[in-house]
Image (cartoon, rainbow, N blue to C red):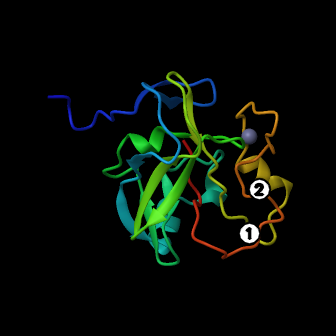
């Protein structure tokens, strides 16, 4: 029996993007639900208490915004989904379904490809260049926007989306 922590679709190893990453161990068809993003469910207030951006040199948490009330902190009881890196040109997307977050394939992914999705951290209305530097992106894509923050044009509060999470 394979160990329960071993995901059938990917393996975790060093990434050129950052730290460790998730790499397809087989062909993954478009639309495949690859893994649930798991961790402890905490309030936004508790998440802010745990991770104080203002006093961190470099942003480094495993938080994912589920909705207005709740974040998932993958630093506590998280699975290998937390190793999936950000890219501005992703092959996966995060889908919220029934108060759960799943990572799904945006397109067919070939064996060996690194799995990536666009974190689109929520951008405060007054976010400026300093904030972008706190959340730098080095995904290496020609489409790279230089930051993990959501694009400036995006409206706030359209839908729950990843916030304050990094690999
Ligand atoms: Zn990028």
Residue 49: image location, x then y, percent:
49, 66
Label 1 CA crowd tier, 10 Å (few <14, some 14–19, many 20+): few
| Residue identifier under label 2 | 131
Between the C-alphas of marks 2 and 1, the distance is 9 Å
Q: Quadrant of ligand 1?
A: top right
Quarter of the rendering occupied by the N terminus:
top left
Residue 70: image location, x then y, percent:
45, 72
Question: Which badge, 2 or 1, is on the more N-terminal residue?
Answer: 1
Q: How many marks on residues?
A: 2
Image vertical order of residue 12 relative to residue 129, above or below? above
Mark 2 vs mark 1: in front: 1
| Residue identifier under label 1 | 124
Q: Is residue 66 left or right of residue 163?
A: left
Image vertical order of residue 125 relative to residue 107, above or below? below
Q: Residue at x 35, y 44 (%)?
A: 79
Q: Specify whether tag 1 is near ligand 1 (CB below 8 Å).
A: no
Mark 2 in CB contact with mark 1 (< 8 angstroms): yes
Q: Secondary structure at mark 2?
A: helix
Q: Nearer the viewer, residue 51 or 68?
A: 68
Residue 165: image location, x then y, percent:
56, 53
Q: Is residue 32 left or right of residue 90?
A: left
Q: Is residue 70 left or right of residue 162?
A: left
Q: Residue at x 52, y 21 (%)?
A: 112
């Amino acid at each position: 029996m394979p160990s329960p922590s071993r995901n059938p679709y990917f393996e975790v190893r060093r990434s050129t993007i950052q730290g460790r990453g998730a790499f397809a161990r087989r062909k993954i068809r478009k639309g495949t639900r690859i893994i649930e993003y798991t961790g402890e469910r905490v309030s936004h207030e508790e998440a802010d208490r745990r991770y104080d951006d203002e006093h961190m040199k470099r942003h480094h948490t495993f938080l994912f915004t589920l909705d207005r009330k709740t974040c998932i902190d993958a630093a506590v009881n998280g699975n290998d989904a937390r190793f999936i890196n950000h890219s501005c040109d992703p092959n996966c997307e995060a889908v919220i379904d029934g108060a759960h977050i799943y990572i799904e394939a945006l397109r067919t992914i070939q064996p060996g490809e690194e799995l990536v999705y666009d974190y689109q951290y929520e951008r405060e209305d007054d976010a400026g260049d300093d904030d972008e530097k706190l959340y730098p992106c080095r995904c290496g894509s020609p489409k790279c926007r230089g930051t993990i923050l959501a694009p400036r044009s995006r409206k706030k509060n359209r839908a729950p989306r990843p916030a304050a999470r990094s690999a």
